[in-house]
Image: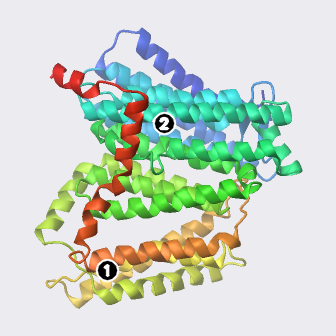
């Protein structure tokens, strides 16, 4: 076992030891949290050292694979390991104060430690069984966190729906591993990907690609199995931050890791793109109708996950990795600071609902498109296709929407426009710089799918603009959009029919 593999595996050992000590030793709140936070900080330092070692050698050694232990380490995996451990440490520090005085803190610390262990193993696993076991154990540990308040019926229902989705995904992943073994005679993921890259499409490879799409849809909570991700708001805020900022993002990493499989079977890639586009469009519209801050954040996660899998389906894997990292950091901050967001939202409501100048909604995409193309022109070569610049311009255009405020001066409005331009420029520059990092990711943009993506993005932007400008005229659609087109009700009924539980009756009886 080489040094890089050892450095990547050490945080798993540290966090596993923390979980075992938490379960075995007498529990005291302050001492238990101090032990976890100290172990999380040590693990964070270790993964930072491992990332530095990997990135400094990225140009010479693209990947380190240990065939005896079934482990691998790449630059992207090392960066994500730092992100995961950093989020785990921040959530631990926040939880030590947030859960003060609550019962079951020992179980919370043990489950959180095991989640971090499982995620680290998932990132470095090169054996199909280890890969499947790590992903499955994440769901098992998250169940203890989601049901932290066992007396809340909707928390139990959300956990049950997630358990059913996870079991179906785990079964599909194991079947995929079996087909990969039959195809190559090896349980190594790297061997399977090399075989796919060398020999191209076959019937078994096609089935593996279809099963991968099913796994991603179930694990990422895309439509129509998204309901549990919305209803986990019954869990403590740190659990929501961990789930939305880390766990559901793992499918993006899996798609990047298994990119050769998706590239060699277009029907599966097109199916994933269609589901992702529908998810992104529906969730974005539903988010505009919700009042609860945490529920809006949850629908935002559903929309972002849909957009991320679309990026992977289009072959823009580097941008998907950037999206994964950016979304994780933003969503962790958003959930952990949700109380401040509620206060700010109430202050905004005192001034009435925001109204925008109609001309700003039409002019904003032109300005953002000019910014994106200008920033790209400053480099020797473009980092992504021109049609993707149009998509980004539409996605960032709301930053330049101008509020109609009677009390605001002309100077205030110019400041708002300048701020939007600055943020758009910053996002573009960061995206361009990220593409220059030696992460070992190869993009394969599919220009043939570009028209569908542009039409969908123009349609989403137009629908959002109509809702903002003419909410009263679209009132008859509000009920359907607010309910998410009743897709979750369909999924819930079938889950309870497949695996019925008496979650409501028992929970109310305990009260």
On screen, residue 78 versus residue 233, left or right, reads right
Q: How is the image coloured?
A: rainbow
- Quadrant housing residue 404: bottom left
Residue placed under numbered mark 2 in the picture: 165
Q: CA distance from mark 1 to mark 2?
A: 44 Å
Q: Position of residue 471 (x, y in %)?
A: 24, 75
Quadrant location, the C terminus: top left
Q: Position of residue 9 (x, y in %)?
A: 65, 29
**SS label for mark 1:** helix
Instruction: Categorize mark 2 by other alpha carbons within 10 Å: few (<14), some (14-19), many (20+).
Output: many
**Rendered view: 64 above or below 418:** above
Which residue is located at x 13 percent, y 72 percent? 351
- Quadrant housing residue 468: bottom left
Q: Nearer the viewer, residue 56 or 200?
A: 200
Which residue is located at x 25 percent, y 88 percent? 411
Q: Nearer the viewer, residue 122 or 226?
A: 226
Q: Earlier in the sequence, mark 1 or mark 2?
A: 2
């Amino acid at each position: 076992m080489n040094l890089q593999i050892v450095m990547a595996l050490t945080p798993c050992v540290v966090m596993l030891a923390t979980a075992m000590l938490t379960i075995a030793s007498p529990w005291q709140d302050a001492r238990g949290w101090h032990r976890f936070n100290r172990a999380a900080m040590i693990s964070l330092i270790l993964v930072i050292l491992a990332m530095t070692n990997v990135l400094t050698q990225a140009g010479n050694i693209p990947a380190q694979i240990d065939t005896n232990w079934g482990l691998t380490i790449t630059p992207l995996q090392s960066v994500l390991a730092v992100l995961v451990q950093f989020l785990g440490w921040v959530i631990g520090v926040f939880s030590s104060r947030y859960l003060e005085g609550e019962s079951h803190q020992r179980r919370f610390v043990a489950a959180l430690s095991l989640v971090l262990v499982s995620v680290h193993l998932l990132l470095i696993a090169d054996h199909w069984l280890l890969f499947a076991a790590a992903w499955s154990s994440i769901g098992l540990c998250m169940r203890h966190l989601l049901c932290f308040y066992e007396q809340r019926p909707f928390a139990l229902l959300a956990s049950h729906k997630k358990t059913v989705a996870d079991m179906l995904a785990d079964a599909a992943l194991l079947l995929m591993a079996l087909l990969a073994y039959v195809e190559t005679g090896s349980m190594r993921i790297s061997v399977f990907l090399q075989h796919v890259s060398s020999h191209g499409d076959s019937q078994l490879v096609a089935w593996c690609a279809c099963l991968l799409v099913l796994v991603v849809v179930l694990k990422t909570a895309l439509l129509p199995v998204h309901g549990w991700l919305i209803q986990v708001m019954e869990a403590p805020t740190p659990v929501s931050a961990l789930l939305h900022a880390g766990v559901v993002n793992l499918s993006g990493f899996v798609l990047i890791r298994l990119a050769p499989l998706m590239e060699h079977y277009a029907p599966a890639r097109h199916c994933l793109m269609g589901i992702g586009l529908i998810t992104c469009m529906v969730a974005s519209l539903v988010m505009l109708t919700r009042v609860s801050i945490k529920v809006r954040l949850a629908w935002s996660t559903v929309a972002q996950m849909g957009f991320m899998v679309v990026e992977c389906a289009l072959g823009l894997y580097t941008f998907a990795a950037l999206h994964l990292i950016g979304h994780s950091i933003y969503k962790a901050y958003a959930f952990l600071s949700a109380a401040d967001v509620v206060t700010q939202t109430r202050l905004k409501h005192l001034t009435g609902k925001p109204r925008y100048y109609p001309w700003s909604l039409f002019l904003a995409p032109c300005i953002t498109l000019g910014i994106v193309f200008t920033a790209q022109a400053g480099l020797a070569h473009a980092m992504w296709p021109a049609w993707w610049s149009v998509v980004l311009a539409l996605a960032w255009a709301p930053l330049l929407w101008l509020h109609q405020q009677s009390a605001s001066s002309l100077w205030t409005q110019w400041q708002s426009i300048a701020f939007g331009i600055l943020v758009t420029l910053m996002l573009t520059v960061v995206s361009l710089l990220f593409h220059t990092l030696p992460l070992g990711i190869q993009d394969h943009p599919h220009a043939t799918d570009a028209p569908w993506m542009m039409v969908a993005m123009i349609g989403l932007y137009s629908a959002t603009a109509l809702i903002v400008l003419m909410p009263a005229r679209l009132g008859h659609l509000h009920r359907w959009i607010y309910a998410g087109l009743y897709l979750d009700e369909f999924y819930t009924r079938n889950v309870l029919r497949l695996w019925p539980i008496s979650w409501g009756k028992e929970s109310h009886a305990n009260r």
